[in-house]
Image (cartoon, helix red, strand yellow):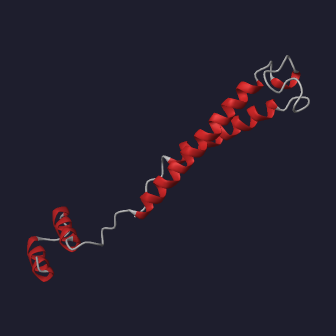
């Protein structure tokens, strides 16, 4: 039985977008000289987007951790969903349930239903 994975594509798009924003924001932190003026709040350096380098770095770090945690949660939910997928062929009542469903759908008539029910021991 296939598991419904329609929710996976939007979440992957959000995670990809968060990774892209983190990469772009992180690249602005590296101004002209990694440890010189412009590393913290900019001091007007050209490489820090008007002095917002540290704030963008914090947002990038936050986006990274949110994306990582959401990815792990989605992976665990997907793995648990795969492990506990319902299997209609298991269980003691499965043959009788299938027979009842076929009778209710009109696939078999009443004498056939009664005969098959007797054969199954129900």
Q: Give the quarter of the figure containing the N terminus.
A: bottom left
85 relative position to 111: left or right = right
The spot of residue 66 in percent (x, y) is 58, 39
117 relative position to 35: left or right = left
Residue depicted at 74% across the width and 32% down the height:
25
Give the answer, above or below, for where 9 lies relative to 114: above
Give the answer, above or below, for where 46 lies relative to 26: above
Quarter of the image holding residue 103? bottom left
Q: Give the quarter of the figure containing the C terminus.
A: bottom left
The spot of residue 23 in percent (x, y) is 74, 38
Quarter of the image holding residue 116? bottom left
Residue 15 visible in the shown view: yes
The spot of residue 43 in percent (x, y) is 84, 17
Residue 14 visible in the shown view: no
Residue depicted at 30% across the width and 72% down the height:
89
Residue depicted at 22% across the width and 69% down the height:
98
Q: Which residue lies furthest to the front in this view?
A: 35
Residue depicted at 88% across the width and 23% down the height:
37
100 relative position to 37: left or right = left
């Amino acid at each position: 039985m296939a598991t419904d994975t329609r929710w996976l594509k939007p979440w992957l798009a959000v995670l990809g977008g968060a990774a892209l924003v983190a990469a772009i924001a992180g690249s602005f932190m590296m101004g002209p000289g990694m440890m010189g003026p412009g590393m913290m709040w900019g001091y007007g350096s050209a490489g820090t987007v008007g002095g917002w380098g540290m704030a963008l770095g914090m947002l990038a770090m936050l986006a990274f951790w949110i994306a990582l945690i959401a990815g792990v949660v989605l992976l665990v939910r997907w793995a648990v969903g795969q492990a506990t997928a319902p299997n209609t062929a298991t269980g003691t009542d499965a043959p009788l349930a299938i027979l009842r469903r076929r009778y209710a759908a009109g696939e078999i008539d009443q004498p056939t239903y009664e005969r098959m029910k007797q054969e199954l021991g129900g």
